[in-house]
Image (spheres, rainbow, N blue to C red):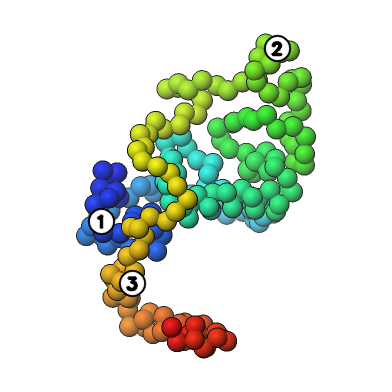
Amino acid sequence: MIPEENEFAFDFDLLDPTKLIPRRWCRCSGLAEWSSTATRITSLPKMNRRPSIPDISSRALISANDPLLQGRLFSYTDTQISRLGGPNFHEIPINRPTCPYHNFQRDGMHRMDIDTNPANYEPNSINDNWPRETPPAAKRGGFESLAERVDGEKIRQRSPSFGEYYAQPRLFWLSQTPIEQQHIIDGFSFELSKVVRTWIASG
């Protein structure tokens, strides 16, 4: 893990997913340990309905500013909406989170709850302003976004720090075994042999 204060301490951008971070540059530590002690059962029927969505996570975890990760967070949710037939896929019993959370959605496929509340918005004057968001609190509180100070202008442009094209590829190449290096050579040779415009392949 790299401390947040060292985000700009390298000659490449940490948010560039093509870059490597050698172990000697950062501290490696285990985050969790997982073990399976339950009896094996046939879970395929249930698992086929279970999506993997990284944007539904513990309040202790927040998403980095990694542009690739941000795109994947949207993509996972978008995929489950089409694969499981609607926006209520999180209500299917196997997908339901251990810590319940609610939203203002009504109707649609896979709706598991029967709403008796006449309002599905806030503020409202027809049901004592309920439902409404739970205020943030240390215990049993609602979600609270991280208060993070950001300076500068946010623009739709790739940072110049993404332009490190030589040292990093060399670092990656040297990290491969001879067999892996040959696989890379074979892969490039195969793909470039399919290019019909020779001036692109030779360039």
- Residue 10 % position (x, y): 25, 56
Find out whether the residues at labels 1 and 2 contact each other: C-beta distance under 8 Å.
no
Q: Amino acid at mark 1?
A: Phe
The residues bearing labels 2 and 3 have C-alpha atoms spaced at a distance of 61 Å
Q: Kindly identify the amino acid type of the residue bearing the numbered disc 3.
A: Pro
Would you identify the image quadrant in which residue 183 lies?
Answer: bottom left
Residue on which the image places disc 1: 10
Marked residue nearer the N-terminal end (1 or 3)? 1
Three-letter code, disc 2: Ser
- Residue under label 3: 169
- Classify residue 203 as left or right of residue 198: left
State which quadrant residue 178 falls in.
bottom left
Which comes sooner in the sequence, label 2 or label 3? Answer: 2
Proximity of marks 1 and 3: CB atoms separated by less than 8 Å: no
Q: Residue at x 43, y 40 (%)?
A: 61
Crowding at dot 2, Cα within 10 Å, few <14 / some 14-19 / many 20+, comes out as few
Q: Is residue 97 left or right of residue 120?
A: left
Residue 93 can be seen in this image: no
Q: Which type of secondary structure does the marked residue at label 3 adopt?
A: helix
Say whether residue 44 is left or right of residue 188.
right
Secondary structure beneath dot 1 equals loop
Picture residue at 57% right of the left edge, 87% below the top: 196
Instruction: Tell me: residue 56, above or below residue 70.
Output: above
Tell me the quarter of the image containing the C terminus: bottom left
Other residues around mark 1 within 10 Å, as few (<14) / some (14–19) / many (≥20) = few
Observer able to see residue 125: yes
Q: How many marks?
A: 3
Q: Residue at x 75, y 41 (%)?
A: 110
Left of 29 or right of it: where is 60? right
Depth check: 16 or 88 in front?
Answer: 16
Residue matched to label 2? 125
Residue 114 point in image, percent of width and height: 76, 28
